[in-house]
Every structure is written in structure tokens, then in C-alpha cells.
Image (spheres, grey):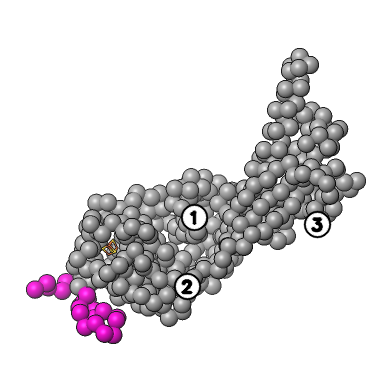
Amino acid sequence: MHAVSAGETLPFICVNPSSSVVFPKTQFRRALINWYRRSGRDLPWRDTRDPYAILVSELMLQQTQVATVIPYYNEWLCRFPDFTSLARASENDVLHAWQGLGYYARARNLHAAAKAVVDRHGGRFPRLVEKMQQLPGIGKYTAHAVASFAFDQSVPIVESNTARVLTRLFDFRESIDSHAGRATLWQHSAKLLPKRNAGIFNSALIDLGALVCISREPKCAICPVKRFCRAENPQTLPVRQSRSRTKRLIEEHAFVIRQGKVLLEQSAARWRGMWILPPLQTSPANQQPIYKSIFPFTNHRIALLVYRRPAPKAAIAKQRWFESIDRVPMPSPHRRATQALVSKLFSRDCRSSQRKRTSTITPAAVVKAVMGSPNRE
Ligand code: SF4
């Protein structure tokens, strides 16, 4: 019989009221953590106990793949190494550093949280999860993740990977989108959690979901906790409410250049604070777009159509001319469109200059040349 050592607790009865089978959580933890020590992922935010670095990683990882996050995370910590440096940064610099990760509310929240940590807590991240959750953009999961990874507090976590593992482990067949379903998952997570080494345990649970108990075809044959798992049809779990159907949208914008400069407008809506190609209120009559792309945004599929337009007599207040967009925070679809259109103009000018045996070509010269013939596209 297994002896209960210090820091361990007795096994719990499965939450399913119809089941009286004892879940051997001590053995489960041991199997999971042994596997994690052998096969867990080596991720940069796991080499630190700095709550700032861990918070940055957690916000970046929301809705974004690990492989995408790693270079952004490393770059971010070079640029803004702590709460103070981030709190002092301009919104422009923060959005520019986040550019390409999408879901820019996360960057704004991180910026606001850094200011709050400096103003309310003297630059030190609070240790109490209740205090953490009073900071902008920090909900229960993020607070618990920082508390367990940075401070090794014994608090449970539930995110997409752990939710998948827990539903399968307990063959939990209610929707995890419902309030009750979510609450049950938090209970399961809390009951499995050890009192010590909670950070390692939570990391192991996440990695099991990311590497073995994966979405469509879980690798049950090599699963280190297979003998504890109650799932009969794991690939059908977790159960989710049916998602609302993807909506299609068309968004039309202008590409305006003058004397080597591109006209951009600061968004006050979806990409608040970032610079985009100026939106058009009405479709240009009898004109074809010079650029088309499709990109996803939450549950939308957006067609971006860009039209060549003449320069206005005067730019409106939220518009500005930019000679370079290198340091300008722009959402990826608009940056790609601008770069593609400028380089298209540049290559055309190169060809025409070569025909004229001209050797000096500058982007400004290209843009000026093209501006002289607005219907050339
Ligand atoms: S046995 Fe399969 S379904 Fe169960 S936890 Fe392991 S990988 Fe997931």
C-alpha cells in the first residue's frame, strides 16, 4: 500500500457522482512529473521565476502558438526588460513591438498592467492572486499561472491544453464553454494539484496536452498517464458549444502616395492606436482594387481591398504622411498590403529606369513617378 508522505494528500473520489472509483492522484502526479522531466518542452519562460517575464509569456501565448511567441518574447524582454521600462514606453513603441502577434488588446493591457504595477505596487508584482486580478487584462488563469510559475504557489490552472487533458482524464462530457462545465474543470485541476512543486505540475499538465493528449488524435499509446485515463472516445472530447458561423466582411481602403510618402490613418476602432491604410466610406466607382487579401479576425473572414486614390488637398486630423513604415505600428494585413504595393511600384520604376539606362533609383523617385499617373494601376 502506498504510504502518504508529507505534502501529499489522500486520493479523492472522482467528481462524477455516479462513480465511486478512487482516483490515485499521488501515482498520477508521479507518472506525469517523471514524464515531464524526461520529455517536457524547454521553453525560455521556464528558465525564469521573474513574474514580469512570465506575465509577458502568458499574455503572448493567449491565442498564439508557442513557436510564434518565442522570438517575440525574446525581443520584447530585450526592449522592455521589466515593469518600469514597459510602463515608461510610449503606446506607439509597445504596439510596434507587438506587431505581428495580433490581438493587440493584449499589448495594451500589458502596458496598462505595467503602469499599474509601478503606480500601485512600487514596481513589484503582487504575490496575491486577488491583487493580480485587479490589474488590467489579468484574469483568473493568468493570475494563477504567474502565481504558480513565478512564486510556486499551489493554485490550479485551466487553459486549452489542460482543459483537454482534464476532460479526457475524467471522461467529462459536459460543454466546457458553460459556466458549470468550466467550474467543474477548475475543481478537477485543483484536486489533482500537489501542495509543493505546483509550478512543475502545472507545466507538466500543459505539456501533456500540447505534446501527447493533442486535439484530434491523442497519442494514447505513448501516454504516460494512460492507466489513469477514463476517456472512452477521447477524440470527441472536450465537448464545446457549436461555434457561431464565420462571417464574411469586405473592407475597402485607399493607397495614397505623394512625394515618396504614404498616407496612413490612426485607427480608433479594431486596431486602436495602430496605423492603417485610410478606410474608404464608399466603393470607388468603375475602379478595380490594386491589392486584395483575405485574413481572419476572431470569427470573421475579412477581404481587404485596396484602391489607388489621389492625394487629398489636406489630410484629416488622424491621418499622417510616412516616408518609412519601419517604426510605425501597423496590423499585419495593412503592413503587407503597403509593402507589396510600394515594392510593386519600385520594381516597375526599376524596369522603366533600366529601359532609360538610369542607374540611380530611390523609392521616393519611384513613388513620385507613379503619383504622376494615378490611374496607371
Ligand atoms: S490516454 Fe489518451 S486521452 Fe487519456 S490523457 Fe492520455 S493521451 Fe489523453
Per the image, the residue denoted by label 3 is: 281
| Residue 16 % position (x, y) | 29, 81
Q: Is residue 234 visible?
A: yes
- Sequence-wise first label, 1 or 3: 1
Taking the view exactly as shown, the residue that stands out farthest to the front is 286
Quarter of the rendering containing residue 258: top right
Q: Nearer the viewer, mark 2 or mark 1?
A: 2
Three-letter amino acid code of the residue under disc 1: Thr
State whether label 1 is within 8 Å of ligand 1.
no
Check disc 2 and give the amino acid type.
Gln
Residue 335 visible (yes or no): no
Q: Are marks 1 and 3 in contact (CB under 8 Å)?
A: no
Q: What residue is at 70 percent from the left and 43 percent from the top? A: 291
Q: Secondary structure at mark 1?
A: loop
Q: Which residues are magenta?
A: 1-23
Q: Which residue is mark 1?
A: 64
Label 2 crowd bin: few (<14), some (14–19), many (20+), radius 10 Å: few
Q: In the image, what residue occupies the spot 81% across and 45% down?
A: 287
* Of residues 215 and 108, the one drawn nearer to the viewer in this rendering: 215
Measured from the top left, where is residue 11 in percent x and y?
A: 21, 77
| Left or right placement of residue 152 versus residue 256 in this view | left
